[in-house]
């Protein structure tokens, strides 16, 4: 048969379908009902480059889980292995309690939403969403019912007749999400799905996506390099660097109790400095630092603490007060180097000795006397507001 050179072919990978209620998470045969994705010692190399270096993690059923890290840290490689778009050199993967590495992508109970959305340009919104269902030869009434239901859920029903070139970035994102959800996956994989959107729209869609996930109860695995996005949306976050998970925890745990300098600086803004342990009591550490003597609440740590131990400490800018304080707080005298307002916040650079501290205050109640560069100021820090780093 002769095929004209202008012919375009579309290759479609069908997705697993289970007979469940529309837009409810698909049932799996997990040995442990609390886990839906289990990764054990996954390693992936590209030549001499090790993209994943023995990554192990468990993702719970129904949670919003984020893989967070800088470019090249391995988060997308890990997502592609879960999706079946790549294979590890070594390691094991279980989805729904069953070995998954031998399964092709189309047999895994997962769907993926990509950053570029990958919509069919010649199909309308409703046709894009229904395409996978039609490939499975479902009855027309079921296709219409499920497509309509998911368009209502993602608030795009009025766009049903439009084509992708007639949609905004946010609308395309919703269509791609609806096309994945209509297949009722056990796990929805999101590869930086909001990376191409402007900041305001991204904030709006973060809230919508989180609310949608809570309503459906589907496990979402989300890849992003945006720290604020991961903290705002996730139940748990795995922070990755150089092919490894350097810390895994809730957003509050990562922000308030980072274990390493990398996590402390990658998650938000922080002030880092070193000190020597002088004395330890049941509740406090007394330390000698470039800021002077500080009392620090004894943290839960695996670090062996002994007299004259060298410590690496941190404190978030908003945990330092420029006005008032409580009895028992650490008090430091400093000189304001610069001060500015971002609208809701006042941001100051304050020099204490030879150390420059970043200090942030909310502008809810403005101080009676405004601070200016060159002013003296007393800073107060509660002993419980410091964190102790393990590196």
Image: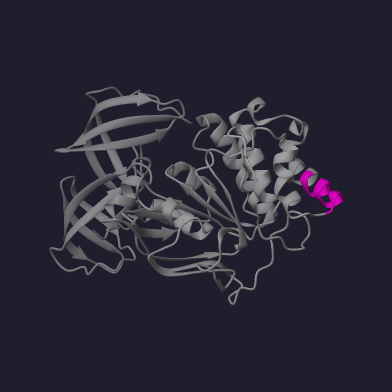
Q: Is residue 113 left or right of residue 54?
A: right
Q: Of helix, strand and loop, which mostly describes the magenta segment?
A: helix
Is residue 140 found inside the magenta-colored segment of the image? Answer: yes
Near-viewer residue (248 or 173):
173
Residue 171 occupies which quadrant of the picture?
A: top right
The residue located at (38%, 43%) in the rendering is: 268
Q: Quadrant of the C terminus?
A: bottom left
Q: Residue 57 at x, y = what percent?
A: 45, 65
Near-viewer residue (259 or 127):
127
Q: Quadrant of the N terminus?
A: top right
Instruction: Confirm whether residue 154 shows in the render.
Output: no
Q: Residue 204 at x, y = what percent?
A: 59, 35
The residue located at (28%, 39%) in the rendering is: 379
Is residue 280 found inside the magenta-colored segment of the image? Answer: no
Which residue occupies the extreme front position in the image? 1
Q: Is residue 343 left or right of residue 31?
A: left
Picture layout, residue 88 above or below residue 193: below
Residue 242 occupies which quadrant of the picture?
A: bottom left
Q: Which residues are magenta?
A: 139-147
């Amino acid at each position: 048969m002769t095929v004209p050179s202008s012919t375009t072919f579309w290759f479609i990978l069908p997705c697993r379908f289970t007979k469940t209620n529309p837009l409810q998470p698909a049932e799996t045969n997990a040995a442990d009902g609390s886990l839906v994705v289990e990764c054990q010692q996954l390693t992936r190399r590209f030549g001499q480059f090790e993209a994943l270096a023995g990554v192990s993690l468990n993702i719970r059923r129904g949670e919003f889980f984020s893989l967070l890290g800088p470019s090249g840290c391995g988060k997308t490689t890990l997502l592609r292995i879960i999706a079946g778009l790549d294979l590890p050199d070594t390691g094991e993967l279980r989805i729904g309690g069953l070995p998954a590495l031998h399964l092709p992508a189309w047999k895994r109970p997962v769907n993926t939403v990509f950053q570029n959305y990958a919509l069919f340009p010649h199909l309308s919104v409703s046709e894009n969403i229904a395409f996978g269902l039609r490939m499975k030869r479902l009855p027309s009434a079921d296709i219409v019912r499920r497509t309509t239901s998911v368009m209502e859920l993602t608030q795009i029903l009025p766009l049903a007749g439009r084509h992708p070139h007639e949609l905004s970035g946010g609308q395309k994102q919703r269509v791609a999400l609806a096309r994945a959800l209509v297949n009722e996956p056990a796990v929805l994989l999101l590869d930086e799905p909001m990376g191409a959107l402007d900041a305001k729209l991204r904030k709006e869609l973060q809230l919508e996506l989180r609310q949608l996930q809570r309503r459906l109860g589907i496990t979402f695995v989300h890849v992003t390099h945006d720290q604020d996005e991961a903290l705002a949306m996730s139940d748990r976050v795995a922070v990755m660097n150089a092919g490894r998970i350097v810390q895994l925890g809730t957003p509050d745990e990562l922000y308030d109790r980072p274990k390493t300098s990398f996590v402390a600086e990658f998650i938000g803004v922080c002030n880092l400095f070193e000190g020597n342990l002088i004395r330890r009591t049941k509740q406090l550490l007394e330390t000698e630092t470039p800021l002077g003597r500080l009392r620090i609440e004894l943290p839960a740590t695996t670090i062996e603490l002994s007299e004259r131990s060298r410590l690496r400490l941190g404190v978030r800018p908003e945990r330092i007060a420029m006005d008032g304080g409580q009895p028992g707080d650490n008090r430091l005298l400093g000189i304001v180097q610069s001060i500015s307002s971002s609208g809701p916040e006042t941001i100051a650079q304050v020099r204490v000795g030879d150390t420059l501290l970043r200090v942030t205050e909310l502008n809810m109640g403005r101080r009676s006397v405004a601070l200016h560069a060159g002013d003296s100021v007393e800073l107060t820090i509660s002993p419980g507001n410091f964190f102790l780093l393990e590196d």
